[in-house]
Amino acid sequence: MGRARRLAPALAASLLPLPALAFDGEVRADTQAQAYQVRGPAGAPLLSMRRFTQTLTLAAFERLRRGVVWTVRARLRFDSDFGTACDLTGDRCLDELNRSRAAEFAPLFARRTLDLPFAWLEGAGLFGGTAEVRLGRQLVTDPLGFFLFDGARLRVRAWDRVVFEAYGGLETRTGFPLSNGRYERDGLQRADRSTWDASLATRVNDRSLAGALSFAVETANAGPLFARATWRRVWGDDGVAEEKLGLAADVQVSTRWRAYVEAVHSIPQQQVSSVIAGATWAGEGASFGAELSRWRPTFDLTSVWASFWTDPIDEGRLRGEIPLGRGWSLRAGTHGRRYALSDAPASDNGPALDDQWSGGGELGALLRRGRYDASARLFGEGGSLGARAGADVTTRVWARWQVVRVDAGVSAWVVDDTLRPERSVASLGLVVGTLLRLGRLADLTLSFEDDINRIVGHRLRAVAMLTLRNPW
Amino acid sequence: MVTRSLLVAMLLVAALCGAVFAQSLPLAPPVPPRASGGAVSHAIFPTQTLPIRFDHARHLRLGGVTCARCHGAAATSEQSADRLLPGEAACTPCHAIDRRDPLKQVPAGAPPARCDACHEGWSASIPLRVARVNIPTPNLHFSHRAHVSRGQRCESCHSSVRRVGLATRLELPAMASCVTCHRAGGSAPESCATCHLTEPDGVLRTRFPEGWLNPPTWMRGMHHDADFWFTHRISAGQDATRCAACHRDDDCAACHDGRVRDRRTHPNDYLTQHPVDARMNADRCTSCHRQATFCVACHERAGVAMGSAPAARAQGRFHPPPEVWSGRGVSLRHHGVEARRSMSACVSCHSERDCVTCHATAGLGGASLSPHPPGFSARCGALLRASERPCRQCHEDLESLTARCR
């Protein structure tokens, strides 16, 4: 009771209107137009893509006394694909949006979409700087991966060293207005089937709402240590779609050394879906890192994929960057992967198998000197699943410092597709582009790419992007 | 249920241990000692032009010469834009400068008085013009007065001045020396915005004409080196609030929403090589693309997916011949093996119905070919309790299945 009496004035003080110290806002618009071609693996059909993407980001911030800041931030996106898919041998273009042509109907292809990647209201610095609340559509990033939902998130700092976080709401899923479901876990194809005939595209499931709840605890102000434990559950009409527990820790052991570890456990599947452990060393301009990981794909628990046999993939990576002086640095990395097929014994469901392996490496030189930025890279990766190797050289030069930049690149690649040898190919790629800074508030980027290989001949790609920013 | 309770208990114990451990930790992150100080950022302290000959070490060895004697205004300076270099008047008490005699000779051992003794590039042909010293305003908030009034000495931040001739950017403090006081539980505010310039929404300003602000190497993997585009997944995944000091949601969505092609991960002619890359590294793809939406939509149009229009699919079979791909003999090119090692690749073209056709029980028209891993029956109860839907796709008799899985 006494505690409640002490909390009441603090609560009232935080909720009372405070005099505003400053009010600011920002508008940002990105316009992107692309045109390129894609050919099917057998050479047909030909997709002639004409894509146009427009995003509009609005933000407003009000700073109040006692460190309280209220922020509204929203992004609206219009994405359209006016391209056509044409069957070259049949000499006609497919009609993917025409529901009367059941065989050609491709329900996951949308010619025009309007979605809201995020839109939230946030109050920070509440209760003497110990609490933060965010309401609306928001993206969470943590060891469990990205998660986009409509709801509320609360973060409270306690005892100065620990932050408790809770969030809940509705997962943003495919098929609902202003949703694209990009961050929805994989497995099921979903769409709004309400306007289709029930016999059409039965492989696609109808949209369905899913609730989400998560709790997390993490360290704060713990100097060299950061640790976070998080639990999340997503459920809908079909049951639990996800329930995971994640633990992560990151320690700056000394001024140079850092170590980190991360593990995610899928509770209903009773298996670890990923474990990562690594260490890095960073000095003046030089850095090295080593990482070991085990990963197993996880899917929506309401899909059959979640109960299928998947074997883990183990990976080891080494990387390093060394300065060579005068703006040059050398970068190298190598990795090896084990597809752990031998972990499972022979059973009625499948025979005993040997592991499969892949591995690769990269060697590159980078130049960052004044107005010049260039890199040259050799890359190779191969194993039982195929191979690819190549080299590329790219340059960026500010013809007029911070006003006009010219980009150019050339690359050569060899791809060996072991599953489909006829798709093995060598290719040459050329790209040129420019960035024009139109005053402080606008950037225009243009690029043109030509990829040449024996399967497609020339594949051309042109991209134009205009970015406008307007703080007020 | 027991497993879940155990996991929750483990989580609580881990959190408790973490909190106890955190309480015992030193408050300050390990940072380089002040003497080394780390690199000085060009974004914070832009390149200077110093056409001057001056020896700090020599002057400071002279009796009575202190920092304040030449930089008297420093102790009361409130802004980083304040000009704190001494003017000629600070030199004349010792240097007998006479502008009417720019080549003035002085007795041996006396401080020189010629213009070119200090001003590099001075020419007798233009005697009253000297090259201009240019020290751009640092891109940060700083009050010398606030620091001096709290007892900080000049050497606390500019320790190497006593050992050098001309003081350059290298004698300015690196962030490592600031955080000895500006840290959680320290004697000075820990907020980044105390010193760093911010955008209107409070996010740190990171782009400057002189370069961009890069976190220091000792800041728990936040330093953006050449490999950061790959390694940032750990930093961002674990401590996203730290990223939010400089980045907004827009920055994540711009790349991870799969609408804009990133050329570092998708080099030239990536469309040709993406099947091989996806088969080997499907986990990388999922950081920006959802296979059952993004990949399927394109594969259906291109004639690759099972749901493609027959006219498009007729151009050729995507997988190896049926006898190899789904025959009785299991080779490494069998679809069962391919699914075990790269199930994500399956999802990028197929719906679950494609699998159910064969893997369902006979009662549902399938061939009762179990796709489950060995030992599945020991743990299928938890999955069944989570959702019956996937079980129903293949199993007719859910009651007996429930009994078996329990």
Image (spheres, coloured by chain):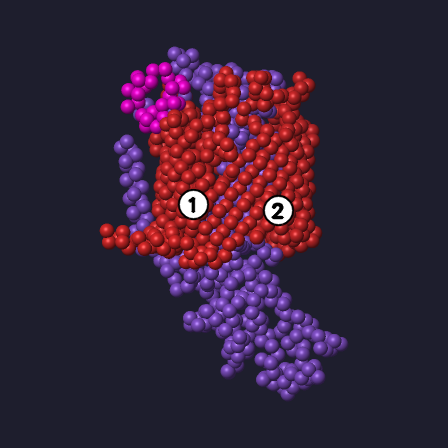
Label 2 marks a residue whose chain is: A
Q: Earlier in the sequence, mark 1 or mark 2?
A: 1
Q: CA distance from mark 1 to mark 2?
A: 27 Å
**Residue A43 in sight:** no
- In the picture, measured across the screen, residue B86 lies left or right of residue B223, that is right
- In the picture, measured across the screen, residue A253 lies left or right of residue B83, that is left
Q: Are marks 1 and 2 in contact (CB under 8 Å)?
A: no
Colour assigned to chain B in the rendering is purple
What residue do we see at 40% from left, 18% from top?
Answer: B394
**Of all residues shown, which one is farthest toward the left?**
A1
Colour assigned to chain A in the rendering is red
What residue do we see at 69% from left, 72% from top?
Answer: B121
Q: Position of residue A380 (x, y in %)?
A: 57, 37
Mark on residue A468?
A: 2
Instruction: Give above or below for A372 relative to B100.
Output: above
Tell which of B228 and B141 is nearer to you. B141
Tell which of A115 and A201 is nearer to you. A115
Mark on residue A228?
A: none
Instruction: Give above or below for A417 relative to B264.
Output: above
Give, as a single range, the part of the protein colored magenta: B379-406
Amino acid, disc 2:
Leu
What residue do we see at 46% from left, 40% from top?
Answer: A137
Helix, strand or loop at label 2? It is strand
Residue that numbered label 1 is attached to: A134
Q: Position of residue B138 (x, y in %)?
A: 56, 63
Predominant secondary structure in magenta? helix
**Residue B381 in sight:** yes
What residue do we see at 68% from left, 45% from top?
Answer: A434
Q: Position of residue A68 (x, y in %)?
A: 43, 54
Label 1 marks a residue whose chain is: A
